Image (cartoon, coloured by chain):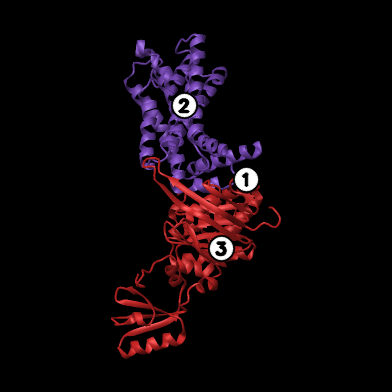
Chain colours: A red, B purple
Amino acid sequence: MRMEAGAVKSVGLRKVYQSKHSGESVEALKGVSIDVDKGELFTLLGPNGAGKTTFLRIISTQLLPSDGDAQILGYSVVNEPEEVRKHIAVVPQDVATYNNFTPWEYGYYFARLRGMNSVEAKKKAEEALKAVDLWDLRNRICQTLSGGEKRRAIIASVLSSDADVLMLDEPTSGLDAVARRGVWSALRELIGKGKTILLTTHMMEEAEMISDRLAIVNRGSVVACGRLDEIKALVKERFRVVINGEFKGLSSYGETAKLGDRNIVYLKTQDEAIDLLKDSLKMNLRAEASPVTLEDVFVKLVGGLNNNGNQ
Amino acid sequence: MGINKILKDTLIIAWIKSYPDFRRNPLMLLLLAMISAIPLFFMLMFSSGGNVIVHGLIGAMVSSVAFAAVMSGIQDISWDRYVKIREMIVAMPVHPASYALGIALAPLLISIPSLVLFGAITAYLGFLNVERLLWIVPALLTVWAAMSTMGFMISTYLFKASPMLLNNLSNLLGIGFIFIPPVYFSEAQLGSLSWISIIIPTSNVAGLIRSYLGLLPLSTETLIIRWTVLIAMTLAFIVLISLKSKWREN
């Protein structure tokens, strides 16, 4: 590990995919620069096709960039991939299990592949399986486990690696709420132990619940980066009012988004929100006010609203 | 990366790829032995005796090694790519040679029970001794290498094909290389076309083993040519793989 180096630092990372048949090129990453500090859980949040997986595959040395470079703990992913691999562990998107493998074997053998001896690997496997709450199921073959348990078995294989930087590509997609919370809890515990985690997700709740900092990525570019409060501060509206039913002249109150028979109105001040609530009640419409969510900010930043403010 | 780490990782990957089958799917080992033994049953039923049974046992030994090697070379690589385990391994401090050798070694471990069974019967019939074994084992190892590298080459060049297509292809190749050429029967039965057996790795090795067991008279020059062709094929497959395969995509 090089002194004074951050956990992850990408500078102008660019990736262009070229179609061999049509000759067309697609720019998946357009010069992405991101810094992740040691001991931080950093989330890349973006819609499908934003470039999150491409970014993760480049910094985990699976894919070469077209331009730019990234460093993991000071080692270049382009020029020093072998050094980088000693310090990282990756869970790819939609990774599946070997059905005839047990969670214990995932934890143990993946630790052995990182160069640990048998005693050390057993210890790490046990710690990892307990962290993801799979210890009691450690000897059951994956074929008999639920989707969430399988995913946690894969995550255990990464945890047992004892790598400094963990990279997880949509680790909870497809999991139910309880299983998702289990994974989140395990990840936060690792942060408590000084590990660095970089994960990608398109789930706002996930980004909001577990991130120390996050970056919103859209169409290959970072459109916002910072702590949750900093990201939310990027839009001037602080409150939202959701109104059920037809409300004429709603756009005069503020920016609106229409979701079928519901309207969301974004407002700058609490007083504006209260006024709108009162007006809605006068019209016999149900309305709820709350602070803006990450999803509201995200939709606004990635251009989910059209010029009229409608989705 | 040190050679010790590369060798250790090779054994771990081979173990990962074979141990669960040994422990949890022993019927698969029986199935592998039975597939290799099927022609043997027919030969026992319809042959008029002589050395036909030994020809069949040679075929069964070659089949045990070659069938699993080509299937594993194609199926394991494509399956690991499909389930994305390979992405995890690429991002680990594991040398690509460890991964490839480990995957190739696994079917060899799996074929050992069948090999021991068919070898024991051949020895019981008085056709196998230690001196002959010293030739037969390298011959079987070479056909394992040839068929594994052939499998790797196919999965490398057809890396965009679906795992289902590759599974079917590997089964077809396995059957095509085992049951059609003179593996279970002597190439002498092909008459003037017996040279064909040299260009097919499985029948080439079967011919070599027959020669070492005294069932097929081959000159020293012919033996050298057969070994050369077998090794050259393996090397050619390795060169073709190295031209196309990428541990890290670009």
Residue at 52% across / 9% down in the picture?
B220
Pointer 3 chain: A
Q: Distance of mark 1 from mark 2, alpha carbons? A: 49 Å
Please say if A125 is above or below B170: below
Q: Using the image as rendered, state which of residue A83 and residue B21 is in the foreground.
A: A83
Q: What x and y, as percent, mark residue B248?
A: 52, 43
Residue beneath disc 2:
B118
Q: Distance of mark 2 from mark 3, alpha carbons? A: 58 Å
Q: How many marks?
A: 3
Q: Distance of mark 3 from mark 1, alpha carbons? A: 23 Å
Dot 3 or dot 1: first in sequence order is 3
Residue beneath disc 1:
A80
Mark 2 nearby-residue class (10 Å; few <14, some 14–19, many ≥20): many
The C terminus of chain A lies in quadrant: bottom left
Q: What x and y, as percent, mark residue A158?
A: 56, 54
**Kind of residue sitting beneath label 3:** Phe
Please say if A255 is above or below A277: above
Does dot 2 land on a helix, a strand or a loop? helix
**Kind of residue sitting beneath label 1:** Glu
Q: Nearer the viewer, mark 2 or mark 3?
A: 3
Does dot 3 land on a helix, a strand or a loop? strand
Mark 3 nearby-residue class (10 Å; few <14, some 14–19, many ≥20): many
Residue at 42% across / 49% down in the picture?
A26
Q: Please give the label number shown on residue B63.
A: none
Residue beneath disc 3:
A42
Does dot 1 land on a helix, a strand or a loop? loop
Pointer 2 chain: B
